[in-house]
Image (spheres, rainbow, N blue to C red):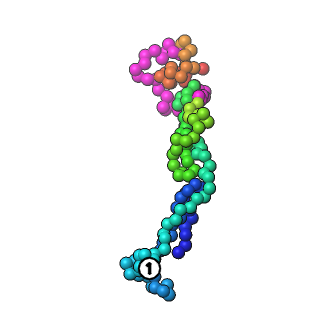
Amino acid sequence: MLLLQCKPSCGSGWKTREVRCMSSDRRERFDDAVCDAMQKPITRTQCNNGKCPPPRWHVGKWSACSAPCGQGQRTRRVVCISKATGRQSDECPMNRKPRTMQQCESSCDSGPPADQCVDDKKVAYCPLVLKFKFCNRTYFRKMCCATCSRMG
């Protein structure tokens, strides 16, 4: 009749144990109905493992930059987790919540591979983009990739 550990690992909780109807020499197990229910030992008792640490913020990994070239943003998941329950909580201080978004910049030096680098068929102004040196702007570089890659 071993008592299990107090759950949860902090704060108030319960210890439980399995109680079986057995012969007096403990070699044979019987159906619970055979034993006197009034003499059955308790199977569950309250316990307390002391005060739980406060919930804390848990952060995920940053996503890739949203811009393939130039300025963009990246995000991550941030959740408050309770030590007592191991579940999401709303008790973390909001003024200490880590950022979920930040600015990022991707290098524009190398465009996509040559076999993926084409000018958008809906755009007719790619020669002008090259002429007026707008290839360093993310939008135009993407729309006129093949033209801009000829830039020397």
Work out whether residue 81 or residue 68 is closer to the camera in this orientation and state it.
81
Q: Quadrant of residue 69?
A: top right
Residue under the image location 49 percent in, 66 percent down: 44
Q: Quadrant of residue 103?
A: top right
Where residue 45 appears, x then y in whole percent? Answer: 52, 65
- Residue 88 sits above or below residue 35 on the image: above
Look at label 1 and name its amino acid.
Answer: Cys
Residue under the image location 59 percent in, 44 percent down: 56
The region drawn magenta spans: 103-130
> Could one spot residue 143 in this view of the protein?
yes
- Residue 143 sits above or below residue 19 on the image: above
Where residue 3 appears, x then y in whole percent? Answer: 55, 69
Residue 119 part of the magenta-drawn span = yes
Residue under the image location 48 percent in, 86 percent down: 24
Residue under the image location 49 percent in, 28 percent down: 117
Q: Find numbered disc 1 in the image and state the secondary structure of the residue it sits on.
A: strand
Q: Residue furthest front?
A: 38
Q: Quadrant of residue 70?
A: top right
> Could one spot residue 65 in this view of the protein?
no
- Report whether 36 appears left or right of 49: left
Work out whether residue 108 or residue 20 is closer to the camera in this orientation and state it.
20
Classed neighbour count for the residue bearing mark 1: other residues with Cα under 10 Å, few (<14), some (14–19), many (≥20): some
Residue position marked by numbered label 1 in the rendering: 21
Quadrant assignment for the C terminus: top right
The tally of labels here is 1
Residue 58 part of the magenta-drawn span = no
Q: Residue furthest left?
A: 33
